[in-house]
Image: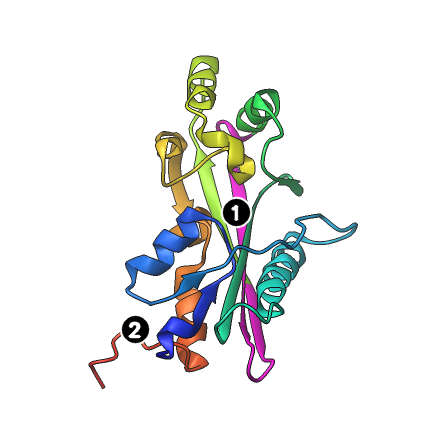
Amino acid sequence: MSAASQIVLASASPRRRDLLAQVGIAFSVEPSRAPEELLPGESPAEHVIRLSREKAQDVADRPEVAGRWFIGSDTIVVRDEQILGKPADRAEAAAMLRSLSGRSHQVWSGYAVIDRQSGTAVCGAVATRVRFKELTEAEIAGYIATGEPMDKAGAYAIQGIGAFMVLGIEGSYTSVVGLPLCEVIEVLERLGAAKLFANHP
């Protein structure tokens, strides 16, 4: 098994899988079963870092899963200090989208890379500001009818149909999609887990 193929993405998210795959890194996928709950008093950064680490650790602790380096990530939307998770139903999705309409909010993505061999864990969080246009009720209803908002934090996907709402971002696009790719790749290279351009000195 090559070093790169010992990387395990501890997530069922197709968006995170696609982001990691697009840079040509070999990895396997093993979804985490860690509960995604908010603890009292947690800041957005503390929340996403803790969950990222717990997701990676959950998979790294399974002896039947082959691999050495385990990547966990968690993404949340924050509006007026309030964390917006995945909507429970269409009514909650509509309420979230109305609350984001015509203004800016933050998207926080945490990441954790655990080296099973050494026990080393490198964690961090990235904040990105996202600005929405004013949404009409027809746009909100139409977007919800596509089904896309229902399993997304903040009830939208910037890489999908939801792109129509986004006037601009300040920060990391890949972090808003679900994985701070720049930071994660840097950690993988630093730990010796991967080399992006292996054929070049």
Looking at the picture, how far across and down is residue 64, in whole percent? 56, 68
Task: From the image, tell me which residue sits under label 2.
Answer: 196
Q: Position of residue 159 (x, y in %)?
A: 36, 41
- Specify the quadrant of the image occupied by residue 3: bottom left
Q: Residue at x 61, y 25 (%)?
A: 92
Instruction: Locate residue 86: give its quadrant.
Output: top right
Q: Residue furthest left?
A: 199
- Residue positioned 45% across, 26% down in the render: 147
**Which residue matches tag 1?**
107
Q: Which mark is residue 99?
A: none
> For this view, does 66 lie left or right of residue 17?
right
Q: Is residue 196 above or below residue 142?
A: below
Over which residues does the magenta segment extend? 100-124
Q: How far apart in space, not on screen, are marks 1 and 2 (Cα)?
A: 27 Å
In the image, 80 versus 198, the foreground residue is 198
Quadrant position of residue 186: bottom left
Circle 1 SS class: strand
Three-letter amino acid code at disc 1? Val
- Residue 11 position within the rendered picture, expressed as x and y whole percent measured from the top left: 50, 54
Q: Which amino acid is tagged 2?
A: Leu
Left or right: 116 in relation to 29: right
User: How far across and down, in percent of the image, does residue 85 sit?
Assistant: 61, 39
Classified by dominant secondary structure, the portion drawn in magenta counts as strand
Identify the residue at horizontal 23%, vertical 86% (top origin). 201
